[in-house]
Image: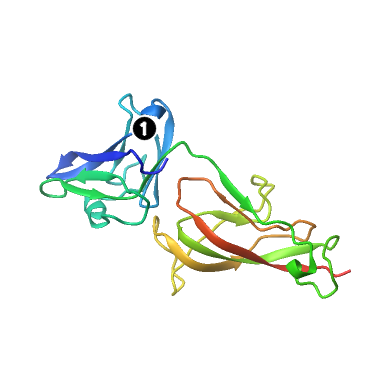
C-alpha cells in the first residue's frame, strides 16, 4: 500500500535526535512480512507488530543497510508522492511535523511487455511484414517519471534463463544516481539479447520502488528474408 492511512512517529532519541521511526496503519497485515520504502529508498523487510506498526531505523544498521536520518526526513517535507503520510520526528529539539512519501506492504512483482512487432510499420523493415523474420532488440528508450529502479530485457523468464538487467540511472554527467533518488526524463541503454522471433521489450519491478513509464520503445535489427 502507499501512504494512505499511515502515520509515523520518531522514537528512541539519542541527544534529542530520534534513531527510529515507528509507522502505524498496517493492522490488516499483523504478523506478515512487509517491505518499506521511504522517499523511494528501499529499507528492507519488516514484520508487522500486533499494534499494526513497523519500526524502521533512522541510522544504518547491520540488518538495515539503508536509512534516512531525522534531519533528512524533515528537509524532505512534502517531497514527491501522492498524499504523503504525516510523521513527527525530533532532530536536536522539539519534534517537527512533516510528511514524506512512504510505501509499505506485501511486495509483488509488477511486469509489462510491448507487443511483438509484426507489421512493416512497427519493425521498420524495407521488405515488408516482419512476421517470420528473426529479430533482435539491441537497445531501448523510455520516458520515465519519478522512477527509482527496475529491470529491463526481452524475456520475463526468471534468471538465469531470462535476460532481465537492473537499470542504472545516471545524471547528465554520467554519474549513477544515489540510492533512493528518482529519475525523470528520457533514458536509453543497450539490451542483452539474441536473435529470435519474439524480442519484445519488457520491464519488471520487484521491490517497492516508484516507477512510472510514460512511453517506451525498442530499436530492432531484423534478419531480412
At a point 53% along the width and 45% down the height, the residue shown is 206
Which of 116 and 94 lies nearest the eye of the viewer? Answer: 116
Q: How many marks?
A: 1
Q: Quadrant of the N terminus?
A: top left
Q: Which residue is mark 1?
A: 26
Q: Position of residue 113 (x, y in %)?
A: 65, 53
Q: Position of residue 192 (x, y in %)?
A: 66, 60
Where disc 1 sits, the SS reads loop
Q: Residue furthest left?
A: 93
Which of 182 and 165 lies nearest the eye of the viewer? Answer: 182
At a point 70% along the width and 60% down the height, the residue shown is 193
Q: Position of residue 55 (x, y in %)?
A: 30, 36
- Residue 33 vs 109, above or below: the answer is above
- Residue 15 vs 166, above or below: the answer is above
At a point 19% along the width and 43% down the height, the residue shown is 18
Q: Is residue 143 left or right of residue 51?
A: right
**Image-quadrant location for residue 130:** bottom right
Asked whether the viewer can see residue 21, the reply is: no
Amino acid at each position: 500500500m502507499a501512504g494512505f492511512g499511515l502515520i509515523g512517529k520518531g522514537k528512541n532519541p539519542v541527544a534529542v535526535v530520534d534513531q527510529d521511526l515507528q509507522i502505524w496503519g498496517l493492522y490488516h497485515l499483523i504478523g506478515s512480512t512487509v517491505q518499506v520504502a521511504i522517499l523511494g529508498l528501499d529499507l528492507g523487510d519488516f514484520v508487522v507488530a500486533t499494534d499494526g506498526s513497523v519500526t524502521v531505523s533512522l541510522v544504518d544498521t547491520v540488518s538495515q543497510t539503508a536509512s534516512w536520518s531525522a534531519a533528512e526526513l524533515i528537509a524532505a517535507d512534502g517531497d514527491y508522492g501522492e498524499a504523503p503520510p504525516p510523521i513527527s520526528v525530533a532532530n536536536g529539539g522539539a519534534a517537527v511535523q512533516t510528511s514524506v512519501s512512504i510505501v509499505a506492504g506485501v511486495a509483488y512483482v509488477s511486469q509489462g511487455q510491448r507487443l511483438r512487432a509484426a507489421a512493416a510499420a512497427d519493425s521498420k523493415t524495407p521488405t515488408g511484414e516482419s512476421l517470420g523474420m528473426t529479430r533482435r532488440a539491441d537497445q531501448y528508450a523510455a520516458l520515465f517519471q519519478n522512477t527509482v529502479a527496475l529491470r529491463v530485457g526481452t524475456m520475463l523468464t526468471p534468471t538465469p534463463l531470462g535476460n532481465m538487467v537492473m537499470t542504472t540511472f545516471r545524471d547528465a554527467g554520467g554519474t549513477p544516481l544515489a540510492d533512493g533518488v528518482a529519475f525523470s526524463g528520457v533514458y536509453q541503454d543497450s539490451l542483452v539479447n539474441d536473435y529470435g522471433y519474439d524480442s519484445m521489450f519488457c520491464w519488471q519491478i520487484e521491490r517497492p520502488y516508484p516507477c512510472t513509464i510514460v512511453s517506451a520503445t525498442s530499436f530492432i535489427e531484423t534478419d531480412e528474408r
